[in-house]
Amino acid sequence: MSKLNRRSFIKTSATAAGVASSIPLFSIGKPGPSANSKINVAVVGAGGQGGYAVNMAASENFVAICDVDDKRSARAVAKNPGVPLFKDFRVMLDKLGKEIDAVAISTPDHTHFPATMAAMECGKHVFVQKPLAHNIWQCRTLQKTARKNKIISQMGNQGHTFEGMRRIKEWTDAGMIGDVSEVITWTNRPNPPWFVPPSSFPPVTADVPEGMDWDLWHGPVEIKPFSHDYAPVRWRGWWDYGCGSLGDIGCHTFDAPFWVLDLGMPTKIEVDRKEPPGPGFISMSSMVTYHFAARGSKPPVTLKWFEKGYDVPKPKCWNKGKPLPSQGGMYMEGSKDTLFHPGMRPNSPQIIPNSRYMEVKGDLKKIPKLPSVGNGPIQEWFNAIRGGPMPGSNFDYSAKLTEIVILGAMAQRSGKTIEWDAKNMKVKGQPEFDAWIKEPVRKGWEYGNS
């Protein structure tokens, strides 16, 4: 249990808007679900990406909606009459915990950790949008807790479930592209509507919108006066709440190279960036270079991340007059060939150029296929809860992927080169990074010995 006394909290907090009178059950602690059973799902965060979780929950037994903002939850409530609404996930878990099997969390980055820990402490399976957490200590604590409590866990990097991801894994493992020593990734972020610098620092304040609990929105972070430059959609550009463009897109675009090359943890992260527009805000343009050591017979790898404003180098075999996809992409330069996918996720992997792809197409078709995993990460998670294979982006995997993303974000935030001691969770020779590796927590929001 967290250090927060949930019973005491409930006495002084807003209560649920309603409580389901009759909910079909196979709650955790009772016999597991059969292949045809429905799962009792609660959703924390119903707006934005939470809409995806709401739609998926509605295909099961949708037992609770939780959101700090009535305006953001209004659509979900209207589409699901009779499903009880809560503002605080702690109240929800206390009141309906016995009726909940699984919790899908789609809140801003800074509240991923407490909502996920609270659910796992109650024995609930968890789905969390990317990035998994806001700091590295949180990532590792979520991974350990999921293992200890035998939780079916999943992070929402959709591309990990794509058929294109499986083709990249198959082709790479079969040696089609040879040894990879360089990976290039890029994005069109930061861009509106998510990344918009305020007109002044600190930003212009306003009254808290009706129906919004601004204190709960902050969760473990020290509360600031309300501003539309923070919420509901611009929080990603502030380091207190988001992890910048890397936090937004990195878990997607790094996913394929991290998985198929078995990269592990980087030893050094370098950054080149434009000066941030003001205190606490991200740089609006940067380039990050990760250095990964050799892994057995696999050579060292340099992985580069380019944001808007930087020229992205083209693959060696790219048509000189052809532009790279403007929204983003990834390619791996191998000793034999180059593997490329456009966009942030591996929708259409290719061996390039097209003439080379046509030459090897027959060989690619002969490579054994990895099994499909279902229609997206939440469906894969549901299948695992019913007894299927553990989801591909479970916390043993996604905690490490997110750690890489956060390391790059720390380099961007500081403007400094980082030499990473992964074993001891330390930046070598720079103890000032400790406060970002494990961030301070507001009283009443302590989980996992935070």
Image (spheres, grey):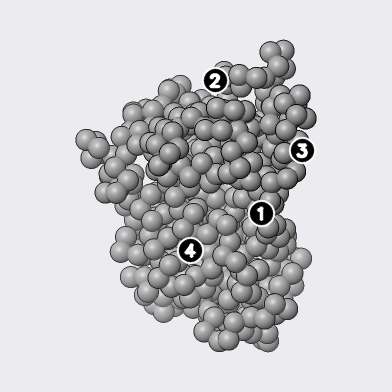
Mark 2: few/some/many CA within 10 Å (<14, 14-19, 20+) = some
Mark 2 element type: loop
Mark 1 element type: loop
Q: Earlier in the sequence, mark 4 or mark 2?
A: 4
Q: In which quarter of the image is residue 176?
A: top right
- Residue at which label 4 appears: 116
Q: Marks 4/3: CA distance? A: 46 Å
Tags 4 and 3 touching, CB below 8 Å: no
Q: Quadrant of residue 167?
A: top right
Tags 1 and 3 touching, CB below 8 Å: no
Q: Report whether 84 appears left or right of 421.
A: right
Q: Earlier in the sequence, mark 1 or mark 4?
A: 4
Q: Report whether 9 appears left or right of 188.
A: left
Tags 2 and 1 touching, CB below 8 Å: no
Amino acid marked by disc 4: Thr
- Residue at which label 1 appears: 370
Amino acid marked by disc 3: Gly
Please name which of the two marks, 2 or 1, marks the residue nearer to the observer: 1
- Residue at which label 2 appears: 310
Please name which of the two marks, 1 or 4, marks the residue nearer to the observer: 1
Q: How many labels does the image show?
A: 4
Query: Does residue 44 appear in this view?
Result: no
Q: Marks 3/2: CA distance? A: 37 Å
Mark 4 element type: helix
- Residue at which label 3 appears: 362
Is residue 449 placed above or below 98 in the rendered structure? above
